[in-house]
Amino acid sequence: QVQLVESGGGLVQAGGSLRLSCAASGRTVSIDAMGWFRQAPGKEREFVVGISWSGGRTSYADSVKGRFTISRDNAKSTVYLQMSHLKPEDTAVYYCAADRLGSTWYVDGMDYWGKGTLVTVSS
């Protein structure tokens, strides 16, 4: 089993920055890809950004391209999300997710989930 723990959420004004971290533990060798999803109040959980563990290929949602950057530390089994130029519409609970088989980045396709960390962007 894989456990994912997010950290780094908080309150920030529009235009500010935050960095989220997701540390994986357990059977991390089974992870093929890791990424971030978010769920805003009253909305469905949506894909934000992901990275393939083997090749480092990244995929970004259009809404965050140019503002968010994902990176990873293989030795620590940790993925990071650097968020800049934050907007009020970025307010959401951000969830770390991992996939054993691939990186299709669908909610139903992810095998492991963290508990989430809240990011609130004020105007």
Image (spheres, rainbow, N blue to C red):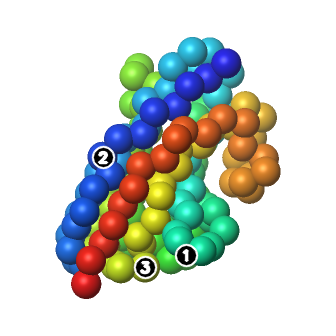
Mark nearer the N terminus (2 vs 1): 2
Q: Residues within 10 Å of mark 1 (few under 14, many from 20)?
A: few
Amino acid type, mark 3:
Glu
Q: Earlier in the sequence, mark 3 or mark 1?
A: 1
Q: CA distance from mark 3 to mark 1?
A: 13 Å
Q: Nearer the viewer, residue 8 or 30?
A: 8
Q: Quadrant of the C terminus?
A: bottom left
Q: With 85 as the anchor, is 49 left or right in this view?
A: right
Secondary element under disc 2, as helix, strand or loop, is loop
Q: Earlier in the sequence, mark 3 or mark 2?
A: 2
Residue 48 is situated, as x and y percent measured from the top left of the image, at: 54, 62
Q: Does residue 92 appear anywhere in the picture?
A: yes
| Residue under the image location 30 percent in, 46 percent down | 8
What's the residue at 28%, 56% (across, down)? 10
Within 10 Å of disc 3 (Cα), the crowding (few <14, some 14-19, many 20+) is few
Name the residue beneath numbered marker 1. Answer: 62
| Location of mark 3 (residue) | 89
Q: Is residue 19 above or below residue 102?
A: below
Comparing 52 with 15, the one in front is 15
Other-residue count near label 2 (Cα within 10 Å), few / some / many at <14 / 14–19 / ≥20 = some
Residue 11, position in %: x, y? 25, 63
Depth check, front residue: 47 or 122: 122
Quadrant placement of the N terminus: top right
Q: CA distance from mark 3 to mark 2?
A: 18 Å
Write the residue at 63% across / 63% down.
Answer: 45
At 30% from the left edge and 72% from the top edge, which residue is drawn? 121
Q: Which residue is mark 2?
A: 8
Residue flagged by tag 1: what amino acid is it?
Asp
